[in-house]
Amino acid sequence: MAGKARAIILGSGTSNGVPMLGVEYPPEFLANPKNHRTRPSCLLQGPSGNVLVDCGPEMRLQLLRENITSLKAVIITHTHADHIMGMDDVRAFCKRDDPPMPVYTAKRYQEDIKRIFPYAFQDQKPGIWVPRYDMREVPEFIHEAGLEIETLWVEHGDLPVLALRVGDFAYVTDVNRIPEKVWSRLLNLKTLILDGLRYRPHPNHYNYEQAVEIATALNAEMTYFTHLSDDYDHDKVNAELPPRIQLAYDGLKIPITL
Ligand SMILES: [Zn+2]
């Protein structure tokens, strides 16, 4: 498929966001806007619209910041709170006469969404405006917004998490193991976005050391770490990382060749 597309890192932060509540930071840390990380999310911009990947608590602010006024579909990688708690705001993109918003996620995560947002699946009185979701199983390829989005399952502790590949770009959030058959689909890309939570090990995420090792082996032209904690002072850490591995930041824009 020929054509141009783009990804926007809407949020590059871990589940707490950065700065974290209840923590005091040096003014130098706070002075760098790239140390301000909202909850993890990504927007895929195709030839005919936008696909939102995850829907964290700052979704409204993220989309306002990037001037996004329409969505074709939502993909939910998994249902941890930092990935779904903005889903109520999807109602902005499914007004009364619009069809429900396509939401692609695993069956088990569909059940979570139905439990957390039951009103989105119920008939409402006239004048009541709620989001409406058209829950869809995850096919091998999602076709939305003129994009062909390959769906790949990685492991996040005991949970399956949806990783996505579009052309020469892949988005792999919340992961601590990449199964062998997925590995080959993530090799030698132009751009890879990869979970690189923090310095200390974590049972369900790659830490810095593991993420560097995985990124080096996957050999993308450029790897950006995401789902970042406050361990990382953006400019300092980027200066220490190899030039082909850097930290992502909120608002990072990545061209995709389809
Ligand atoms: Zn998670």
Image (cartoon, helix red, strand yellow):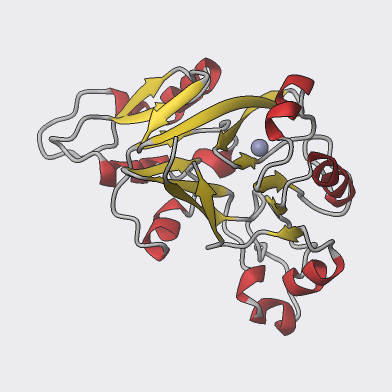
Front in this rendered view, residue 167 or 153: 167
Rendered residue at 41%/65% (across/down): 65
Query: Is 224 placed left or right of 209 in the picture?
Result: left
The residue positioned farthest toward the front in the image shown? 2
> Which quarter of the picture shows residue 215?
top right
Query: Is 17 placed left or right of 205 in the picture?
Result: left
Query: Is 20 placed left or right of 112 in the picture?
Result: right
Image quadrant of ligand 1?
top right
Residue 153 against residue 2 in the figure, above or below: above
Rendered residue at 76%/49% (across/down): 197
* Res 155 seen here: no
Q: Position of residue 166 (x, y in %)?
A: 53, 37
> Which quarter of the picture shows residue 74?
top left
Front in this rendered view, residue 38 or 126: 38
Residue 58 against residue 132 in the figure, above or below: below
Front in this rendered view, residue 60 or 52: 52
Q: Position of residue 169 (x, y in %)?
A: 59, 43
> Which quarter of the picture shows residue 235?
bottom right
Q: Position of residue 17 (x, y in %)?
A: 63, 57
Total marks placed? 0
Rendered residue at 45%/30% (across/down): 116
* Res 200 seen here: yes
Q: Position of residue 112 (x, y in %)?
A: 50, 24
Rendered residue at 79%/63% (across/down): 243
